[in-house]
Structures are given as C-alpha cells and as structure tokens.
Amino acid sequence: MKARMILSVFVLIVLSVFMLIPRVTQGVQPEPSVGCIESAIIHVNYGEHTLNCSIDTPSDRDSFEFNGTAGDNIRVIVDVTSSNFEPRLEIRDPDGTIILDKACNGSACTVREDLTLLLSGTYLMAVSDGSISRVGNYILQLEKFPPAFNPPGISYDNTLDDTIQHASDVDFFEFDGVAGTDIRVIVDVTSSNFEPRLEIRDPDGTIILDKACNGSACTVREDLTLLLSGTYLMVVSDGSISRVGNYQVNLQCVFGSCPSFVSSVPVCDIQMSQPSYIDGDTVTASVFRIANPSTDPVAVEWAVWLGIPSNHPVSIINLGATGTLVLPAGFDLDLGPINFFPAGVVPLGQYELSCRILDPVTKRQLALDVNPFTIE
C-alpha cells in the first residue's frame, strides 16, 4: 500500500544517516540465560535465568553453581513452568554448609528466597522434586541487589515502558533522590493480567517499600518521603511469579527538590503529533529520537515497527543485531517531525508506532517506547 512505500523511503533516509556514525568496539557482556545440560554443574551468573531445565524422573537432581561475594544480597527463584512437581531448592556455601533447604507444597508452586551471603567463593545450588514423586519443567533465576549491570534511569514526571517477559523476570530501575523530598511511584499494567510487585531500596540498600497488588491488571501506587540523598533502586516483578505482561513505571515529584537523572542507558523516544487522525490529517511523529547519554560508546540493536489493525506489524528499522551499530558517547539524534502517510489512505483502526533498544549480545531490553494511535 502507499503507506508501505513511504515507510520504505524513510528507512533509506535513516540508513543513510547512520552510515555517518563512527564504528567502535565494545566489550562482551554476560549472557542473560543459560541452557541446562543433564549430568553437568551449570554455572549461572547474576542476572541470568536458565532455559530448558527439567526434572526428568522423580529422583532427578539438577546442579548449578555461582560465584558470590560476602555481603551480596541475592534472590533465587525456582518457577515451575509445566506439570505439577513441587520444587526443592538447596544452596551450599563455599565451605559446604547448607544455607538454604526449601521446598514448596502444591501444584506448580514456586520457591523464592532472598539471602545475604556471608562468604566469598563458589556456591552450589540443586533443584529436585521435594516429594520425589513428580516431574516437570522449571526456570531458575539468580539476581543480585543492586544488579550486576547499570539499570535504566528514570527521571521525575516521566514514564518508562517495560515487560515482564517470563514469570520469574525481575526488572530494575534507578532514580536520584534528595532527603526530605516527597515522591509518588506508580506501576501500571498495560497488557495481560500480571500482578505487579514493586520494591524500592534506598542508597544504603535498605528496603523502604515492598508492595504488590492482587487482581487482574492491577496497579501499585505509593507515596514516599525520602530520608536519604543518593541513588535509589526500583525493582518490578510479578508478585505471584506466575504471569507476564507489559507495564509502565511513572515517577512523580510531589514536593521538594527533585534532581534530574542523567541516565547511562540508551534512549529511543517516539512521540506522535496527536492521539488520533482522521481523513485529511497526516500521520506524524513529532519526535523520532535515539540517544546515548553515556560517557562511553555503546553497541545497540535498534528496532522500530508500525502496528497495523488485523495484520502483522511492519518493520521500519531493524539495525545492529550483530553489534555493528555503535552509538558514540553523548550521541543524540532526533529525526522528527516526520510525516509518514495521509490518514485517508489506510484502513481505520488502532495502530502503534513503537521502538525498542536491545543489548546486541545479551538481547536484554534496554529501552521500550510503545505509542498507540487511532485512525478514524
């Protein structure tokens, strides 16, 4: 259709712009997931989750290891993804002492435990069926607070979009706070029916909020008075460790001094000129931006797509999947405003023009901006 031709021309323009970006190399980051191999001890890094793990026979026992440092605050999750086995999780410290032996009772239940490590060295983990009578598949997730990567930063009076991609997924965000400031934090589910859990840790690592909501696509909203100045950590997950979905995090400055957060995470930002268009209007992105606020160059995978009613999304941009797109330090490019196509040449309905940025090595989502609009 005519709109598709206009989009193709736009892609050529964008590609020609990015041919001018200098190419530099970037270090390889740890993989976010690791496959399971029977009869082997699987090494898991902080921030990783397992793939294709299963208890194949009632007496099966899967073994894992991770490197920990004394003082690390960690979370381990074993989430059953099929069948009804009841997982048992054992953890031994570097001296061989059992520091956790926990099982759950019930069909496809979940083990989740937070621990503070007392020793530095290699820890052993084992997953089995607690009753030695059942089999099934599962995901093991290992996290550290704060995480082993730089979380996306969120500014006051701003909103970030993200996704709980699997039931044990844990998302991290950072914001700067000043003692005595009153703030409001909102986690609003935008698709599916997962039940968000919001945790906030102050600059000392103390948990100052741990709140979840119950019900389909519910919302967490909390007002807080900050007692310390520094960087705060926000953590979003599914409270029941059983559901997935999209959500938005909104941070508001209610009273006091709220500093601007300078993020080190790449940005993709698309803003439509209006929420709906009629015949005679031109569908326009007033902002079409990609940026790297970091003081270091960063390799990214950048994707932009147009969602079309009752059809598959149309890919507009898909660059950097192999790490060849590197944004220089301080790079900031806004191609908007861009006129895409007249509203009268396409079917009526709900559309979206959205973008995301991934780490090209780990495929971890760094930025997501979803922009629905209608043509009436």
Image: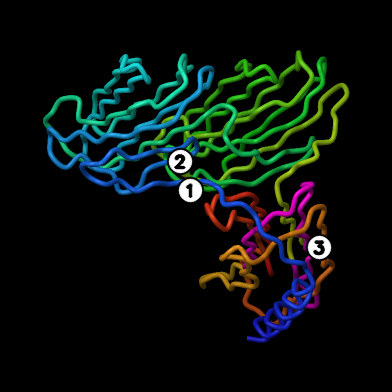
Q: Please, what secondary structure does the residue beneath circle 1 have?
A: loop
Which residue carries the number 3 mark? 273
Q: Is residue 285 above or below residue 109?
A: below
Which residue carries the number 2 mark? 48
Identify the mark at residue 208; answer none if there is no mark: none
- 281 falls in the magenta region: yes
Color style of the picture: rainbow
Which stretch did the figure color magenta? 277-305
- Callout 1 amino acid: Glu
- 84 falls in the magenta region: no
- Residue at image point 58% right, 70% down: 308
Q: Position of residue 178 (x, y in %)?
A: 82, 21
Identify the mark at residue 31; answer none if there is no mark: 1
- Callout 2 amino acid: Glu
Whether tag 2 and tag 1 are in contact, CB under 8 A, the answer is yes
Residue toward you, 146 or 250: 146
Q: Viewed as shown, does residue 210 lie left or right of 299?
A: left
Q: CA distance from mark 3 to mark 1?
A: 38 Å
- Residue at image point 83% right, 62% down: 334
Q: CA distance from mark 2 to mark 1?
A: 7 Å
Picture quadrant of residue 21? bottom right
- Residue at image point 16% right, 35% down: 60
Picture quadrant of residue 42? top left
Q: Is residue 202 above or below residue 344?
A: above
Callout 2: few (<14), some (14-19), or many (20+) C-alpha neighbours within 10 Å?
Answer: some
Q: Viewed as shown, does residue 89 lie left or right of 248?
A: left
